[in-house]
Image (spheres, rainbow, N blue to C red):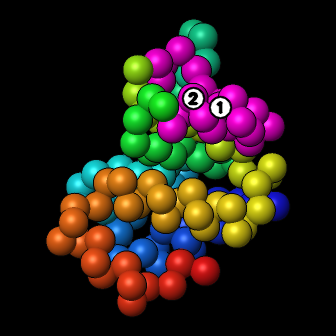
Amino acid sequence: MADADDVRRLALALPHVVEIDSEGFDFRVVDKGFVWSYPERRPGGPRAIRTDIAVLYVGDEAEKQALLLGEPELFFTTPAYDGSPLVMLRLAQVGVDRLTELVTDAWRMRAPDSVESDLDGANPR
């Protein structure tokens, strides 16, 4: 099972990644977010940063729906993310190998081509 430390380790092993100061984790590649802590909205109160849930960039609605329908034990969404290519991932339900794949894929979708070629020298495992 994975946790926020695994997300941090995997994200920071990728080229050109910057961690944004936050209550949880928030990673960007060339100023584009690809994985961050879930800011859960609570009625009548401030958002709670959930480090047990990662928000992942998935590229498009088709990929989002495939993950939501194919692995509902891992992925979910909320109405606030309708129309956005983002899914929430329950970290306690995912293994580190699968998390590595998901974080790397999110990075690839956000990194420009000029940066993506630097991935060959990186080892996020």
Please report contact status of discs 1 and 2: CB closer than 8 Å, yes or no: yes
User: Can you name the residue that lies furthest to the bottom here?
Assistant: 121
Picture residue at 35% right of the left edge, 69% below the top: 17
> Pointer 2: residues within 10 angstroms few (<14), some, or many (20+)?
some
Q: Where are the magenta residues, as a range? A: 63-82
Secondary structure of the residue carrying numbered label 1? helix
Image height of 66 relative to 22, above or below: above
107 in the magenta segment: no
Residue beneath label 2, please? 65
Q: Quadrant of residue 89?
A: top right
Viewed as shown, does residue 124 lie left or right of 110?
right
Q: Nearer the viewer, residue 69 or 94?
A: 69
Tally the numbered discs: 2
Farthest residue to the left: give it: 114
Question: Residue shown at 46%/43% (left/top)?
Answer: 58
The amino acid type found where label 2 is placed reads Gln
Q: Residue at x 71, y 36 (%)?
A: 70
Question: Counting other residues with Cα less than 10 Å from the Cα at mark 1, is it few (<14), some (14-19), or many (20 or more)?
Answer: some
- Between residues 6 and 86, which one lies in front from this camera angle? 86
The residue positioned 60% from the left and 67% from the top of the image is 100
Q: Is residue 9 left or right of residue 11?
A: right
Image quadrant containing the N terminus: bottom right
Q: Amino acid at mark 1?
A: Leu
Q: Measuring from the top left, give residue 31's x and y in whole percent.
A: 24, 55
Image spot of residue 125 (x, y percent):
61, 80
Vertical side of 85 occupied by 8: above or below: below
Which image quarter: residue 97? Answer: bottom right
Q: Which mark is residue 42?
A: none
Q: Which mark is residue 68?
A: 1
x, y (%) of residue 15?
35, 77
Q: What element does badge 2 sit on? A: helix
